[in-house]
Image: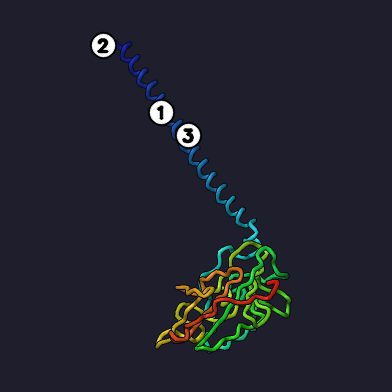
Amino acid sequence: MTSGSAKKRAAAARKALETANKRDRRRRHLFSYSMVGLVVLVVVGVVLALSLHKSSPAAASGIPATPATTAAPGRTDQPPWPAPFDAAAQVKDAGLPMLGTEGEVVHIHAHLDVVANGQKVEVPALIGIDESTGQLSPLHTHDTTGVIHVESPVKAEFSLGQFFTEWDVSLSADHLGSLHTGDGKVLQAYVNGKQVQGDPAAIVLHAHDEIALVYGTAAQQANPPASFAFPEGL
Protein backbone atom coordinates (compact mmCIF):
# COMPACT_ATOMS: atom_id res chain seq x y z
CA MET A 1 0.00 0.00 0.00
CA THR A 2 1.49 3.34 -1.03
CA SER A 3 1.68 6.29 1.32
CA GLY A 4 -0.26 8.37 -1.24
CA SER A 5 -3.29 6.04 -1.06
CA ALA A 6 -3.25 6.11 2.73
CA LYS A 7 -3.21 9.90 2.71
CA LYS A 8 -6.16 9.99 0.32
CA ARG A 9 -8.17 7.62 2.52
CA ALA A 10 -7.35 9.66 5.63
CA ALA A 11 -8.39 12.86 3.90
CA ALA A 12 -11.65 11.26 2.77
CA ALA A 13 -12.34 10.05 6.31
CA ARG A 14 -11.72 13.52 7.71
CA LYS A 15 -14.02 15.05 5.12
CA ALA A 16 -16.76 12.51 5.91
CA LEU A 17 -16.38 13.22 9.63
CA GLU A 18 -16.58 16.97 9.05
CA THR A 19 -19.72 16.50 6.92
CA ALA A 20 -21.33 14.38 9.62
CA ASN A 21 -20.45 16.93 12.29
CA LYS A 22 -21.92 19.77 10.21
CA ARG A 23 -25.11 17.74 9.71
CA ASP A 24 -25.37 17.08 13.46
CA ARG A 25 -24.86 20.77 14.24
CA ARG A 26 -27.59 21.74 11.79
CA ARG A 27 -29.96 19.23 13.41
CA ARG A 28 -29.18 20.54 16.88
CA HIS A 29 -29.75 24.10 15.74
CA LEU A 30 -33.03 23.20 14.08
CA PHE A 31 -34.18 21.39 17.26
CA SER A 32 -33.20 24.38 19.40
CA TYR A 33 -35.05 26.78 17.10
CA SER A 34 -38.11 24.50 17.16
CA MET A 35 -38.13 24.38 20.95
CA VAL A 36 -37.74 28.17 21.18
CA GLY A 37 -40.62 28.56 18.74
CA LEU A 38 -42.78 26.17 20.74
CA VAL A 39 -42.07 28.03 23.98
CA VAL A 40 -42.89 31.35 22.29
CA LEU A 41 -46.20 29.94 21.00
CA VAL A 42 -47.13 28.65 24.48
CA VAL A 43 -46.29 31.99 26.11
CA VAL A 44 -48.25 33.91 23.48
CA GLY A 45 -51.22 31.57 23.99
CA VAL A 46 -51.20 32.05 27.76
CA VAL A 47 -50.89 35.83 27.46
CA LEU A 48 -53.71 35.91 24.92
CA ALA A 49 -55.97 33.75 27.12
CA LEU A 50 -55.32 35.95 30.15
CA SER A 51 -55.91 39.06 28.07
CA LEU A 52 -59.21 37.74 26.75
CA HIS A 53 -60.30 36.74 30.28
CA LYS A 54 -59.44 40.16 31.69
CA SER A 55 -61.20 41.92 28.84
CA SER A 56 -64.37 39.83 29.08
CA PRO A 57 -67.40 41.70 30.47
CA ALA A 58 -67.95 39.18 33.27
CA ALA A 59 -64.34 39.34 34.46
CA ALA A 60 -64.29 43.14 34.26
CA SER A 61 -67.50 43.39 36.30
CA GLY A 62 -66.29 41.06 39.03
CA ILE A 63 -69.31 38.79 38.49
CA PRO A 64 -68.43 35.12 37.89
CA ALA A 65 -70.20 33.57 34.92
CA THR A 66 -70.67 30.36 36.90
CA PRO A 67 -72.03 30.76 40.45
CA ALA A 68 -70.89 29.06 43.64
CA THR A 69 -72.73 25.81 44.31
CA THR A 70 -72.35 26.01 48.09
CA ALA A 71 -73.17 28.69 50.63
CA ALA A 72 -70.47 30.31 52.74
CA PRO A 73 -70.65 29.65 56.50
CA GLY A 74 -73.40 31.77 58.00
CA ARG A 75 -75.60 32.13 61.07
CA THR A 76 -76.64 28.90 62.74
CA ASP A 77 -79.35 30.27 64.99
CA GLN A 78 -83.13 29.87 64.98
CA PRO A 79 -85.32 31.84 62.58
CA PRO A 80 -86.33 34.52 61.97
CA TRP A 81 -83.14 35.76 60.32
CA PRO A 82 -83.03 39.52 59.70
CA ALA A 83 -81.00 41.03 56.89
CA PRO A 84 -77.33 41.29 57.91
CA PHE A 85 -76.03 44.61 59.18
CA ASP A 86 -73.05 44.71 56.80
CA ALA A 87 -74.57 43.98 53.40
CA ALA A 88 -71.39 44.78 51.48
CA ALA A 89 -69.34 42.27 53.45
CA GLN A 90 -71.85 39.50 52.81
CA VAL A 91 -72.03 40.34 49.11
CA LYS A 92 -68.24 40.10 48.96
CA ASP A 93 -68.39 36.69 50.67
CA ALA A 94 -70.81 35.61 47.94
CA GLY A 95 -68.17 36.51 45.35
CA LEU A 96 -70.23 39.36 43.95
CA PRO A 97 -69.60 43.12 43.59
CA MET A 98 -71.59 46.04 44.87
CA LEU A 99 -72.99 48.06 41.96
CA GLY A 100 -74.00 51.69 41.68
CA THR A 101 -77.05 50.87 39.58
CA GLU A 102 -79.18 47.85 38.76
CA GLY A 103 -77.92 45.85 35.80
CA GLU A 104 -80.03 45.27 32.73
CA VAL A 105 -78.28 42.52 30.73
CA VAL A 106 -79.80 39.86 32.99
CA HIS A 107 -83.03 41.03 34.61
CA ILE A 108 -85.13 38.23 36.07
CA HIS A 109 -87.01 37.46 39.28
CA ALA A 110 -87.43 34.29 41.30
CA HIS A 111 -89.43 33.69 44.47
CA LEU A 112 -88.28 32.01 47.67
CA ASP A 113 -90.45 30.42 50.34
CA VAL A 114 -88.87 29.16 53.54
CA VAL A 115 -91.09 26.98 55.75
CA ALA A 116 -89.84 25.66 59.10
CA ASN A 117 -91.93 23.26 61.17
CA GLY A 118 -95.05 24.31 59.32
CA GLN A 119 -94.41 28.05 59.82
CA LYS A 120 -93.43 30.45 57.08
CA VAL A 121 -90.09 32.22 57.66
CA GLU A 122 -89.88 35.79 56.40
CA VAL A 123 -87.30 36.54 53.71
CA PRO A 124 -86.25 40.04 54.75
CA ALA A 125 -86.01 43.16 52.65
CA LEU A 126 -82.68 44.75 51.68
CA ILE A 127 -80.63 41.58 51.39
CA GLY A 128 -77.70 42.62 49.21
CA ILE A 129 -78.47 46.34 49.50
CA ASP A 130 -76.43 48.93 51.41
CA GLU A 131 -78.81 51.81 52.12
CA SER A 132 -76.01 54.01 53.46
CA THR A 133 -74.19 54.06 50.11
CA GLY A 134 -77.04 53.28 47.72
CA GLN A 135 -75.05 50.38 46.29
CA LEU A 136 -76.49 46.95 45.71
CA SER A 137 -75.59 43.45 44.63
CA PRO A 138 -76.84 42.09 41.30
CA LEU A 139 -78.69 39.62 43.57
CA HIS A 140 -80.97 41.31 46.15
CA THR A 141 -84.39 41.82 47.71
CA HIS A 142 -86.35 45.06 47.99
CA ASP A 143 -89.16 43.93 50.29
CA THR A 144 -90.40 40.98 52.37
CA THR A 145 -92.41 39.28 49.62
CA GLY A 146 -89.70 36.69 49.01
CA VAL A 147 -89.05 37.99 45.49
CA ILE A 148 -85.35 37.70 44.62
CA HIS A 149 -84.21 40.28 42.07
CA VAL A 150 -81.43 39.27 39.67
CA GLU A 151 -80.23 42.39 37.86
CA SER A 152 -76.79 41.96 36.36
CA PRO A 153 -74.83 44.17 33.94
CA VAL A 154 -73.28 41.06 32.34
CA LYS A 155 -74.52 37.64 31.32
CA ALA A 156 -74.12 35.29 34.29
CA GLU A 157 -75.97 32.77 36.42
CA PHE A 158 -76.76 33.13 40.11
CA SER A 159 -77.40 30.47 42.75
CA LEU A 160 -79.43 30.05 45.91
CA GLY A 161 -76.13 29.53 47.74
CA GLN A 162 -74.99 33.02 46.78
CA PHE A 163 -78.27 34.43 48.05
CA PHE A 164 -78.00 32.62 51.40
CA THR A 165 -74.42 33.83 51.75
CA GLU A 166 -75.70 37.39 51.28
CA TRP A 167 -78.43 36.62 53.83
CA ASP A 168 -75.74 35.24 56.16
CA VAL A 169 -77.74 32.09 56.90
CA SER A 170 -75.99 28.72 56.88
CA LEU A 171 -77.41 26.33 54.29
CA SER A 172 -76.51 22.84 53.10
CA ALA A 173 -78.21 19.54 52.39
CA ASP A 174 -78.51 18.71 56.09
CA HIS A 175 -79.33 22.02 57.77
CA LEU A 176 -80.80 25.48 57.49
CA GLY A 177 -79.50 27.83 60.18
CA SER A 178 -79.82 25.81 63.39
CA LEU A 179 -82.43 23.48 61.87
CA HIS A 180 -80.69 20.13 61.34
CA THR A 181 -82.02 16.99 59.75
CA GLY A 182 -82.54 13.89 61.90
CA ASP A 183 -84.95 12.71 64.60
CA GLY A 184 -87.76 12.64 62.08
CA LYS A 185 -86.98 16.05 60.60
CA VAL A 186 -85.96 16.53 56.97
CA LEU A 187 -84.96 19.48 54.80
CA GLN A 188 -86.30 19.37 51.26
CA ALA A 189 -85.86 21.79 48.39
CA TYR A 190 -88.45 22.23 45.66
CA VAL A 191 -88.39 24.17 42.40
CA ASN A 192 -91.83 24.79 40.91
CA GLY A 193 -93.23 22.03 43.10
CA LYS A 194 -90.65 19.40 42.07
CA GLN A 195 -88.25 18.05 44.67
CA VAL A 196 -84.56 18.78 44.09
CA GLN A 197 -81.92 16.42 45.45
CA GLY A 198 -78.55 17.40 46.89
CA ASP A 199 -77.36 20.67 48.33
CA PRO A 200 -80.07 23.32 47.77
CA ALA A 201 -77.32 25.94 47.58
CA ALA A 202 -76.53 24.64 44.07
CA ILE A 203 -79.96 25.61 42.73
CA VAL A 204 -79.57 28.11 39.88
CA LEU A 205 -82.14 30.92 39.79
CA HIS A 206 -84.29 31.19 36.65
CA ALA A 207 -87.02 33.60 35.67
CA HIS A 208 -90.21 33.10 37.71
CA ASP A 209 -88.93 30.04 39.55
CA GLU A 210 -90.79 29.25 42.75
CA ILE A 211 -88.15 27.89 45.13
CA ALA A 212 -89.27 26.40 48.43
CA LEU A 213 -87.12 25.19 51.33
CA VAL A 214 -89.26 23.11 53.68
CA TYR A 215 -87.95 21.86 57.02
CA GLY A 216 -89.95 19.55 59.26
CA THR A 217 -91.53 16.13 59.45
CA ALA A 218 -92.47 14.08 56.41
CA ALA A 219 -96.09 15.12 56.92
CA GLN A 220 -95.07 18.77 56.81
CA GLN A 221 -93.54 18.21 53.38
CA ALA A 222 -96.98 17.75 51.84
CA ASN A 223 -98.10 20.37 49.32
CA PRO A 224 -94.98 22.55 49.13
CA PRO A 225 -95.44 25.93 47.40
CA ALA A 226 -95.36 25.26 43.65
CA SER A 227 -95.97 28.69 42.13
CA PHE A 228 -96.05 32.40 42.91
CA ALA A 229 -98.17 35.16 41.43
CA PHE A 230 -95.52 37.68 40.41
CA PRO A 231 -96.74 41.27 40.29
CA GLU A 232 -97.16 42.77 36.85
CA GLY A 233 -93.86 43.98 35.49
CA LEU A 234 -91.70 41.44 37.32
Q: Give the image location of residue 16, x and y in percent.
A: 38, 22
Can you identify the residue that label 1 sits on? Answer: 21
**Residue at left offset 33%, top offset 16%:** 9
**Res 134 → quadrant:** bottom right
* Label 2: element kind: loop
Q: Quadrant of the C terminus?
A: bottom right
Q: Mark 2 to mark 1: distance in Å?
A: 29 Å
Can you identify the residue that label 2 sits on? Answer: 1
Q: Amino acid at mark 1?
A: Asn
The mark lying in front, picked from 2 and 1, is 1
Q: Amino acid at mark 3?
A: Leu
Front one among 208 and 1: 208
* Label 1: element kind: helix
* Residue 204: assigned label: none
**Residue at left offset 39%, top offset 20%:** 15
Q: Give the image location of residue 190, x and y in percent.
A: 51, 76
